Amino acid sequence: MTQVSMLADPVRLRLLSLIASHEGGEACVCDLTGPFDVSQPTISHHLKVLREAGLVGSERRGTWVYYWVLPTALARMSSLLQTSAEPTEVGAC
């Protein structure tokens, strides 16, 4: 799966957005479970998928894991999205 397709799941897309917009640019997993109607293990699974896709980094600090969005991943995704969103010319009929 590509990095962009990893965001096809609305939970992962929202997690990425929450992490990116969190104060200080990183979020504790404890800050990420409240906004969702899914279990904590499900959130952990989605975070693992984002981490394995190279979209977020993580670090354990004591009992908590902190996540941040990797800037290079965002730059690559932005470039891909801009390329795929460019309008194509349609010939006259």
Image: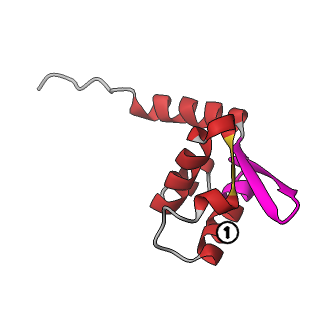
Q: Is residue 93 left or right of residue 75?
A: left
Q: Residues within 10 Å of mark 1 (few under 14, many from 20)?
A: some
Q: Which quadrant of the structure image shows residue 5?
A: bottom right
Q: Is residue 4 above or below residue 77?
A: below
- How many numbered callouts? 1
- Element under disc 1: helix
Residue 93: quadrant of the picture: top left
Q: Which residues make up the magenta segment?
A: 50-69
> In the orientation shown, which residue stands out farthest toward the left?
93
**Image point (71%, 33%), residue name:** 72
**Residue 9 visible, this orientation:** no
Image: 76 above or below 7: above
Is any part of residue 42 visible from this angle?
yes
Can you give x and y, in whole percent of width and height, for residue 73 in the image?
68, 38
Residue 24 relative to residue 38: left or right: right
| Identity of the residue furthest to the right in this view | 62
Q: Is residue 59 magenta?
A: yes
Quarter of the picture containing the N terminus is bottom right
Name the foreground residue: 39 vs 82.
Answer: 39
Q: Position of residue 15 (x, y in %)?
A: 56, 54
Q: Which residue is mark 1?
A: 44
Q: Position of residue 76 (x, y in %)?
A: 63, 34
User: In terms of secondary structure, what is the magenta stretch mainly?
Assistant: strand
Q: Amino acid at mark 1?
A: Ser
Residue at screen point 79% across, 62% down: 64
| Image coordinates for residue 45, horizontal then vertical, percent | 66, 70
Residue 42 position (above or below residue 30):
below
Q: Residue at x 62, y 57 (%)?
A: 31
